[in-house]
Amino acid sequence: MTAQKKRRRRDIEKNYSVKQFVKKLRRLADCIEQGQRFQIRVAGERISIPATAIINIEHERGDLSEEVEFQLKWPLDI
């Protein structure tokens, strides 16, 4: 058995109250500003985002809605 855990594919959207979202954004902003790893729990799974993650903002527009996503991307250690 390898030291790495098998990671299952996952695609989840989680809704938060305004207060919860603001709290998470503040923690994220502090970590980015300080060059630190950011940890968050989403739908029961702890995610650890390295300080080297690429940050981008995505905008999508469809016929009935628009969406803005704040994204953090990083390679997996395989």
Image (cartoon, grey):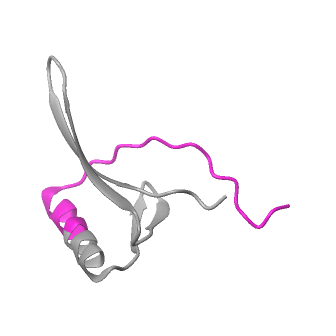
Viewer-nearest residue: 19 or 56 = 56
Looking at the picture, how far across and down is residue 72, in whole percent? Answer: 35, 56
Viewer-nearest residue: 47 or 37 = 37
Is residue 15 covered in magenta?
A: yes
Residue occupying image coordinates x 14% and y 20%: 64
Looking at the picture, how far across and down is residue 26, in whole percent? Answer: 19, 72
Residue occupying image coordinates x 28% and y 73%: 32
Residue occupying image coordinates x 19% and y 36%: 67
Q: Is residue 60 above or below residue 77?
A: above
Residues rendered magenta in the picture = 1-25
Q: Is residue 42 above or below residue 29?
A: above
Q: Is residue 4 above or below residue 73?
A: below
Residue occupying image coordinates x 15% and y 64%: 19
Q: Please identify the quadrant where the C terminus is shown.
A: bottom right
Name, please, the residue furthest toward the top: 63
- Majority secondary structure of magenta residues: loop
Looking at the picture, how far across and down is residue 76, in whole percent? Answer: 57, 57
Q: Is residue 32 above or below residue 4?
A: below
Residue 61 found in image quarter: top left
Viewer-nearest residue: 55 or 19 = 55
